[in-house]
Amino acid sequence: MASIFTKIIKGEIPSYKVAENDKFFAFLDIFPLKKGHTLVVPKQEIDYIFDLDDNLLKEYIAYAKKIAKAIEKTIPCKRVGMSVIGLEVPHAHIHLIPLDDIGDMNFSNEKLKFTEDEFKSIAEKIAANV
């Protein structure tokens, strides 16, 4: 059965897309820790990031870097943090989170809420900087 991320990539479930290429897809987390919290996923459905082929993993990190740089240009922050947990969805994914404090990456923090228009605006602004 396809993961929720595969369904998002295929357009079966709507998302706030930031960018994509032939191998990767980046979109806003709908339960963000910070404004601009973005998920980057490979289009190939692989559960565990360290099961990715070495070359694909290198490309994945380079693509995540490109998205992180776009987030930095868009969202005022000290830097963008990267987290790979991979327990909640069985599809490899990188969280890119704008940071001002180390506590900003605490996944126990209350999630932010944005309207659909706010999500669209954030995604469009990041996309313009990719």
Image (cartoon, rainbow, N blue to C red):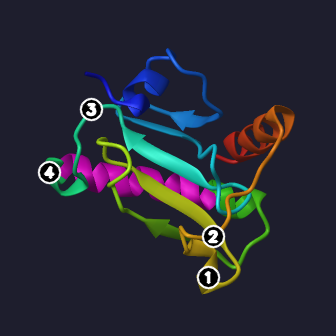
Classify residue 85 by image quadrant. bottom left
> Callout 3: helix, strand or loop?
loop
Rate crowding at label 3 as few (under 14), some (14 to 19) or many (20 or more) other CA atoms within 10 Å: some
Q: Is residue 3 left or right of residue 16?
A: left
State the separation of the CA atoms marked 1 and 2. Answer: 8 Å
First reached walking from the N terminus: tag 4 or tag 2: 4
Q: Which mark is residue 103?
A: 1
User: Mark 4 or mark 2: which is in front?
Assistant: 2
Rate crowding at label 2 as few (under 14), some (14 to 19) or many (20 or more) other CA atoms within 10 Å: few
First reached walking from the N terminus: tag 1 or tag 4: 4
Residue designated by label 2: 109
| Amino acid at the residue labelled 3 | Gln
Residue designated by label 3: 44
Q: Quadrant of the C terminus?
A: top right
First reached walking from the N terminus: tag 3 or tag 1: 3
Where is residue 61 shown, x and y percent of the image? 36, 57
* Residue beneath the point at 61% across and 82% down: 103
Rate crowding at label 4 as few (under 14), some (14 to 19) or many (20 or more) other CA atoms within 10 Å: few
Residue designated by label 4: 51
Where is residue 79 shown, x and y percent of the image? 63, 75
Residue 28 drawn above or below residue 35: above
| Amino acid at the residue labelled 1 | Gly
